[in-house]
Image: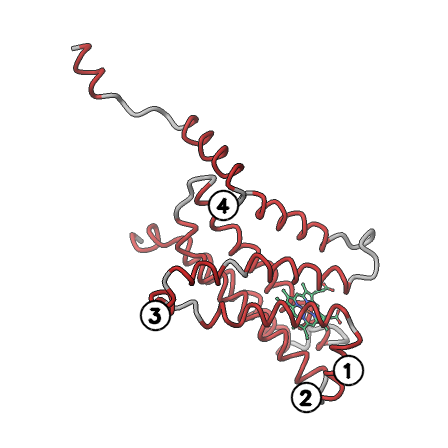
Amino acid sequence: MRWLRANWLRALVHLGALAPLFFIVLDNYRYNLTANPIQEITVRTGKAALVLLVLSLACTPLNTVFGFREAIRVRRALGLYGFMYVALHLAIFVVLDYGVNLQLIGQAIIEKYYVIAGFAAFLILVPLAITSTRGWMRRLGRRWKTLHKLVYLAVPIAVLHFALLVKSLGSRPEPLIFGAIVLGLLALRLPTIRRASSALRLKNRSPLPNRAQGSRAD
Ligand code: HEM
């Protein structure tokens, strides 16, 4: 019980991140993946990937702006789970959808803008996933942080991929909602906004008893 109280967020992240995979396997077993199962699992893995990547982006502002330090402890897990779903999403596209036909895949990459955007986001995420270990963090030193800032490029490109696939954003505004959230998270990283919001947080915090004043009053 004490372990759960100390690690509730980690437990929630692992359970929540594995839930989409669990339901894909369960629904496949129950023949419950619609009339077009390949499309269904492509959409499900894509959405799981995007949600987890956006949540991993939210961890830093949750710490710096709102003082929720726990978020930093789950950032890596969220990012890696996000990457796991991207890799599954791509594997489904390559193996199940295109039967590993490299000529057809090449043609899709050239012809469909949303595939180009998806691939670009994937390629940016690969080095980030590989270097997410403590060993790589130590080896790269300062450059590790610079490299991992690329996630702020990969996620907007992934949102663009989603927007390009949707026929009418008026009737399906999800990509716009994701886009607005990502823009908001990027804005919270701007030094001026970050400084202003942490100053506000410090101001709103209940003041600590001032020992010096206390002893003078005595
Ligand atoms: C960071 C990388 C990626 C993310 C976050 C992502 C996310 C998504 C999302 C959210 C959807 C769902 C669209 C919907 O609800 O209709 C989707 C669909 C799709 N994605 Fe991706 N994607 C990524 C990369 C890729 C890559 C690399 C490919 C393949 C080259 C790809 C191929 C597709 C296809 C074919 C669909 C359409 C499924 C359909 O409706 O038929 N995606 N993706």
How far across and down, in percent of the image, does residue 136 sit? 38, 69
Any mark on residue 61, and which? 4
Q: Could you tell me the amino acid type at mark 3? A: Gly
The residue at which mark 2 appears reads as 100
Residue at disc 3, CB closer than 8 Å to ligand 1: no
**Is residue 195 toward the left or the right of residue 103 in the image?**
left
N-terminal label among 3 and 1: 1
Specify which label sits upstream in the sequence, 1 or 4: 4
Q: Is mark 1 within 8 Å of ligand 1?
A: no
Camera-side residue of 36 and 177: 177
Sequence-first disc among 3 and 4: 4
Q: Nearer the viewer, residue 22 or 50?
A: 50
Q: Ligand 1 is found in which quarter of the picture?
A: bottom right
Residue 38's x, y, as percent?
71, 77
Q: Name the residue beneath numbered marker 3.
A: 135
Q: Nearer the viewer, mark 1 or mark 2?
A: 1
Precedes in sequence: disc 1 or disc 2: 2
- What is the tally of numbered marks visible in this picture? 4
Label 2 neighbour load within 10 Å: few <14, some 14-19, many 20+: some
Q: Residues within 10 Å of mark 4 (few under 14, many from 20)?
A: many
Residue ID at (53%, 54%) = 57
* Amino acid beneath label 4: Pro
What is the C-alpha distance between the residues marked 2 and 4? 40 Å
Disc number lying in front (3 or 4): 3
User: In the image as oriented, which residue stretches furthest toward the front?
Assistant: 143
CA distance for labels 3 and 4: 25 Å
